[in-house]
Image: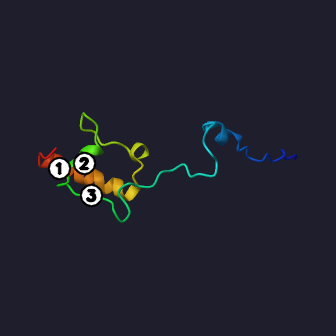
Amino acid sequence: MKRKPHKKKSYQNNFAKLSIFQNQKYKFKKKCPLTGKSAPIVDYKNIKLLKRYTTENGKILPSRITSVSQKKQRELSLSIKRARNLALI
């Protein structure tokens, strides 16, 4: 029973997706805008903040677009739903 030789994974595919002008030593993922010292508090009463994370039709934007962390995305969606229920949005 012969085994096939194990190929090393090619990392060329990941680098092909990068822009020519991007330097490879920088991080690609942006930090969460809702965490940190000067971050706004996620609350259903903060309508200006909630409107920033919804579309014109009222749908909640996904975290891959807004670069919000998973924990804060759950808080954000809960507060948006509460604000909708109270007719604030």
User: Label 3 is placed on what type of residue?
Assistant: Val
Marks 2,1: beta carbons within 8 A: yes
- The residue that label 2 is drawn on is 50
Query: Residue at image x 24%, y 44%?
Result: 51
Query: Residue at image x 79%, y 45%?
Result: 7
Could you give the CA–CA distance between mark 3 and mark 2, rounded to whole angstroms? 8 Å
Could you give the CA–CA distance between mark 3 and mark 1, rounded to whole angstroms? 12 Å
- The residue that label 1 is drawn on is 83
Q: Earlier in the sequence, mark 3 or mark 1?
A: 3
Mark 3 surroundings within 10 Å by alpha-carbon count, few (fewer than 14), some (14 through 19), many (20 or more)? many
Considering every residue shown, the one lying at the far left of the view is 87
Give left or right: position of 61 versus 14. left
Q: Earlier in the sequence, mark 3 or mark 2?
A: 3
Give left or right: position of 10 versus 76. right
Could you give the CA–CA distance between mark 2 and mark 1, rounded to whole angstroms? 9 Å
Residue 59 location, quadrant: top left
- The residue that label 3 is drawn on is 42
Foreground mark, 2 or 1, reads 2
Considering every residue shown, the one lying at the far top of the view is 57
Looking at the picture, tell me which residue is in the foreground, 4 or 23.
23
User: Label 2 is placed on what type of residue?
Assistant: Leu
